[in-house]
Image (tube, grey):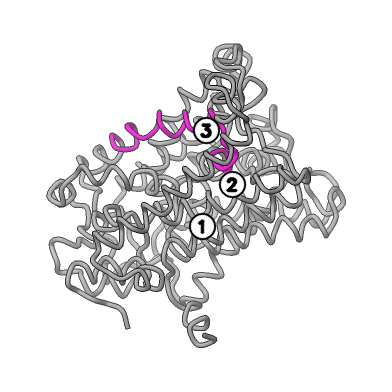
């Protein structure tokens, strides 16, 4: 048993195990703050620090107080810890300029989407779905078709080969000559330190992270600093971020591929191959592997919320605002979906990819900043349109169902939890059958080991 645990340290993990860490991070945060993890506003606050103290402007800072979000710092560090444990930074992946541009646009769209959708995909999917939020389901369902449109567009411009859950050098070298497993990021002569675009983007990241940390540690001028919240709170938030970043980086967990996986049932491998997407990505989707991690996190958190609420020691978090559902949720869902696909990762997965050294995550970062600006400049015109009138008087699905269909709200809550558990069990059962593996293999092997075994090219040691 001890040897198996030690073996997990240098290897990639299966999605479900990464999802367990993501769910645990949400539970730890909820236990302390009676809410789910909130990161998007913290991102804006960290941008506001560099704005004010480096350039003397308040483009983002006019709405968001300069501050630091320790969960974000922890998530980046947790992912960096994974790179150290696996002895492999993903800086070796060389991206075509088109893919970097797509990622920049993705960051822009996603960032603006968070403003009108009232949060990012992590907020709505990993926090809102466990909290039974009507708005979060609307964000999810309105975004799925646009996620596939974004995926199609990326394939149309020849960037499909970059879409994989995680890049590992061993796999890239092994399949570099296989036309069904394109490895466009592998270039023998590529030197990250000699790439001027990468160096410029890395400098942007360094300033973005270092400025808030320095001000938080040595001054009392920003929100969330040591003098503001104290070391205990910093330690708690950092622990949450470390769990989150480590779990995501260990398996490639992301909300975007998780919600797209079930739709792969209706596609053929040839569709992916024509678009230059690795066949392994198709098998990963059809095997429901991302959905497994996603549902493990959601079910864990949902059961903890429900148990806490029933025992009277916690509340059901509100993921949507006072009126439950706004036009912003409907309009913002597509932006979040397109942005997440273009970045090859949702917001928290982008934090993990920053820690791992992916250039697409670096390119998305300035896009995030620019995406905030339309909202901070024109919030007085935008808010009355997207947040003026609520579209429902209900916050949660059980509350709505009890009103319209009758019955006790507690019974509807239990039914909702059972529905989530059913999806979780389906994802494992379907994946086991499609990949032709035992349940033990499904639980023990990581994604590369599973999908390449199914393709007849076993890479497990």
What is the magenta range? 127-149
- x and y percentages locating residue 291 in the rendered image: 39, 51
Are the two marked residues, 2 and 3, in contact with CB atoms closer than 8 angstroms? no
Circle number at residue 302: 2
Q: Position of residue 289 (x, y in %)?
A: 36, 57
Quarter of the image containing the C terminus?
bottom left
Which residue in the protein does label 3 denote? 136
How far from the left and from the top, in percent, is residue 411?
59, 36
Question: How busy is the neighbourhood of tag 3: few (under 14 within 10 Å), some, or many (20 plus)?
Answer: many
In the rendered view, tell whether residue 323 sits above or below residue 142. above
Q: Quadrant of residue 185?
A: bottom left
Determine which residue is flagged by label 1: 352
Residue 205 lies, with reference to residue 11, above or below; the image says above
Percent coordinates x, y for residue 175 in the rendering: 20, 70
Q: CA distance from mark 1 to mark 3?
A: 23 Å
Q: Secondary structure at mark 2?
A: helix
Front position in the image: 152 or 135: 135
Question: Which comes before the other along the chain, label 2 or label 1?
Answer: 2
Q: Residue at the spot x=56%, y=70% of the render?
A: 81
Q: Secondary structure at mark 1?
A: helix
Q: Nearer the viewer, mark 2 or mark 3?
A: 2
Q: Residues within 10 Å of mark 1 (few under 14, many from 20)?
A: many
């Amino acid at each position: 048993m001890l040897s198996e645990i030690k073996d997990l340290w240098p290897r990639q993990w299966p999605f479900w195990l990464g999802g367990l860490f993501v769910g645990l991070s949400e539970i730890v945060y909820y236990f302390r703050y009676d809410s789910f993890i909130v990161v998007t506003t913290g991102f804006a606050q960290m941008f506001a620090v560099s704005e004010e103290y480096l350039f003397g402007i308040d483009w983002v800072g006019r709405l968001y107080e300069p501050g630091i979000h320790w969960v974000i710092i922890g998530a980046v560090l947790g992912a960096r810890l994974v790179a150290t444990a696996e002895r492999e930074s993903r800086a070796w992946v060389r991206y075509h300029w088109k893919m970097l541009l797509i990622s920049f646009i993705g960051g822009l769209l996603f960032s603006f989407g968070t403003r009108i959708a009232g949060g990012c995909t992590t907020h709505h999917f990993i926090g809102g779905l466990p909290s039974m939020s009507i708005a979060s389901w609307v964000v999810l369902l309105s975004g799925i078709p646009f996620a596939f449109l974004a995926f199609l567009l990326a394939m149309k411009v020849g960037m499909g080969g970059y879409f994989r859950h995680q890049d590992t050098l061993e796999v890239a070298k092994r399949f570099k000559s296989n036309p069904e497993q394109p490895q466009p990021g592998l270039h023998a002569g590529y030197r990250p330190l000699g790439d001027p675009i990468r160096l410029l983007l890395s400098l942007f990241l360094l300033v973005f992270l270092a400025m808030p940390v320095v001000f938080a540690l040595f001054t009392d001028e920003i929100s969330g600093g040591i003098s503001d919240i104290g070391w205990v709170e910093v330690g708690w938030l950092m622990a949450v971020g470390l769990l989150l970043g480590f779990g995501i980086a260990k398996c490639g967990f992301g909300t975007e591929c998780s919600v797209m996986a079930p739709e792969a049932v209706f596609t053929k491998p040839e569709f992916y191959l024509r678009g230059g997407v690795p066949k392994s990505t198709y098998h990963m989707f059809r095997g429901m592997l991302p959905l497994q991690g996603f549902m493990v996190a959601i079910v864990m958190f949902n059961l903890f919320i429900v148990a806490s609420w029933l025992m009277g020691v916690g509340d059901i978090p509100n993921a949507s605002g006072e009126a439950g559902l706004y036009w912003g949720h409907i309009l913002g869902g597509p932006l979040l979906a397109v942005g997440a696909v273009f970045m090859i990762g949702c917001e928290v997965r982008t934090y993990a990819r920053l820690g791992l050294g992916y250039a697409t995550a670096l390119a998305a970062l300035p896009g995030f900043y620019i995406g905030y600006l339309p909202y901070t400049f024109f919030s007085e015109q935008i808010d009355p349109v997207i947040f003026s009138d609520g579209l429902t008087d209900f916050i949660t699905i059980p509350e709505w169902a009890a009103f319209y269909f009758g019955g006790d709200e507690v019974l509807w809550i239990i039914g909702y939890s059972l529905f989530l558990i059913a999806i979780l069990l389906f994802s494992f059962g379907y994946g086991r059958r499609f990949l032709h593996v035992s349940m033990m293999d499904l639980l023990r092997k990581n994604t590369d080991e599973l999908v390449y075994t199914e393709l007849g090219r076993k890479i497990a040691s």
